Amino acid sequence: RTSVERTFSRLKEHLNLENLTVMGAKKVKTHLIKNERISKLTNEKSILLNLNKGLELIRKWSKFKKEIKELKKELLEIALKENIDENILDLYRKAEEIFEEKKLDDCPLCGDSNKAIDEIKSEVSDYLKAAKKLTEVREKIKKADTAKRDEKVKLKELFKELNLDYVKENLNEKYIHKQKEKLLYNESDNYDQELETIDKIEEKLRNYKKKKEEISKYNEDIEKAEKAFEKEIESNKKIDEILQQIKEFEDIMNNHRNDFIKNLLSQLSGLIKEYYNDIVIDNKIEEIHFKNKKDIVLDINFKGYKGENNDPRKILSEGQLKCFGLAILLALHEKSGLSLLVLDDIINAVDIDHRKNMIDLIISESKKDRQIIITTYDKLFQEKLINLAEANTAVSYYFSDELLLKEANNNFADIIKRSTAKNDCRNALLYMRIALENAVYHMAEEQKINVPFKDEMRKYGLSQLLKSVIKSKKIIYPVKELLSDIKENYNYSMLNQEAHFWTETAHRIDHQTLEELRDKIIAIYKMKDLNNDCLPDLNKLKENGIEPVEEESNKKLVSAGILVKDGDDYASTSKWDDIKEYINQT
């Protein structure tokens, strides 16, 4: 087998290129045969480079040798010309030091004049300069000799590497040129292109090996993926079976849920109707039905209307739907027996009349031993709810600018007191009117007092309302007396401060008058729920204090918010402090 075949065989064995095509193998073999000579020349090129290096070293060595010879000749010439004697050189140096240190005008030895001194100085200086030059030439000879020895060492190592005889006769350019002639490699020839071809072939072989490894890896990954895919198909079949079972179970549960909710809502229909009719003013519900469909559908019938059942979402207004939703929520809560109820912004889109009924219903529900949390953006709704609720049964909170939850005191009486203390006349009078109208409206509605409208647009007039309430026998005398006082002695139009916003006369009320009016209106506001039955007990409490009052009377006064029981003892409340002055025997 030829060397090319052996080389190709070794390449195949090394690269393990089993998947090389026949055509590809032939191309590689052809290139190797063609470049067999280049393979040999590549090795000889390295030898030639070393020979060139040796040639350069010989030239340097010869140069240093010649330089040393010339320097030695120069050294001899200087020594002979200047007649330098090393034994007296130190004496000349000492004389120069003396001339430099003493600065003498006469010779220190013989006393000759300056002229003789100058001649001596010149002679000493010339002698030392010649000696210095001699020293410099010796240093150059020393350096050249050192460099020559270094080049000689390098030559010796290079000759050893090239297997050449290192003898003095061979240390010349002629010997090196003779060795170069023995080589096939010629520096004038250009083999770079063929060498580049060899490099490309080797690069292709490396790429073939790399691709083969990648393909082998991909084959393994494909086999693994196929096995995983088969397992996934089996797993998906099982999952489909489980999903089908889950769907069947879900359908059963949904049907059961719908049946359960329909049954529950059918039981709640009476409660929903009751709650809704308590809120709305007209168009009250007669019946509520639930259709037996997949989704729960609720239909309603109204009192006084005949015909088919109606979908509340299609016939009720947005405000009525809010009321209907609240009715459903309250009914579900009643049925659940839970003690906590959260109502989120329930009055949105609800008009004023229905809001009043909502407030009454919420207050009524809060008395059923349950906790009700209400969120709202409506300040008026918040204030009405807080002030209509019984004392100590409702609290109000708001978020500050720092997003902190803080307690808000929305009680009309407290707002009036705070505004008066701050000399905020406008705000105090505004809330006095609100509190007065609230109390009078409340008494008129609770006692069912017939109050004629002032006109169809403005409904109640405050003067007409006060007159009607004062005439009623159902109102306790202290309240009547205070209302009469306000009606006769105060211009109650000043309570509407917002109507006089742009006039200075709206603020022209002295502080004493403001405080008197404040105390009277607060007393009316806090006595709005009191009736004639409790008046005797109030008179006894004012006359005799708490202790002598009978236990039964005390219980009545606790229920009215006048007293509070602490253990076995009773104490008066702020409500009593605000109304005590106006309780009398009449």
Image (cartoon, helix red, strand yellow):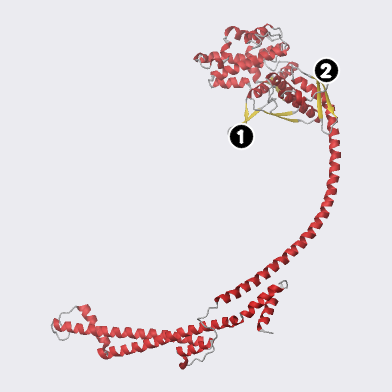
Q: Is residue 368 visible?
A: no
Could you tell whether 187 is left or right of 214 in the image? left
Disc nearer the start of the sequence (1/2) = 2
- Numbered label attached to residue 306: 2
In x, y percent, where is residue 235?
Answer: 82, 53
User: Horizontally, is 169 left or right of 12 in the view?
Assistant: left
Image point (25%, 86%), residue name:
91
**Front one among 24 and 472:** 24
Quadrant in which residue 532 is drawn: top right
Could you tell me which secondary element the residue under label 2 belongs to?
loop
Q: Residues within 10 Å of mark 2 (few under 14, many from 20)?
A: few
Towards the viewer: 295 or 203? 203
Q: Name which residue lies at 55% across and 18% down.
A: 426
Quadrant housing residue 545: top right
Residue 345: horizontal and vertical position, in percent? 68, 28
Q: Amino acid at mark 1?
A: Leu
Q: Is residue 397 above or below residue 108?
A: above
Does 522 sit left or right of 48 as displayed? Answer: right
Report the mark closest to the observer, 1 or 2: 2
Seen at 86% across and 42% down, the residue is 248
Instruction: Specify whether residue 141 is in view.
Output: yes
Question: How many residues crowd mark 1 within 10 Å: few (<14), some (14–19), many (20+)?
Answer: few
Q: Quadrant of the C terminus?
A: top right
Vertical position of residue 510 compared to residue 229: above or below: above
* Residue 48 or residue 388, whichever sits in front: 48
Q: Which of these two is toward me, 392 or 381? A: 381
Instruction: Residue 133: name its quadrant.
Output: bottom left
Where is residue 325 shown, x and y percent of the image? 75, 27
Q: Is residue 508 above or below residue 298?
A: above
Q: Which amino acid lies under the numbered mark 2 shown in the image of this protein?
A: Lys
Q: Which residue is mark 1?
A: 404
Q: Which quadrant of the figure contains the N terminus?
A: bottom right
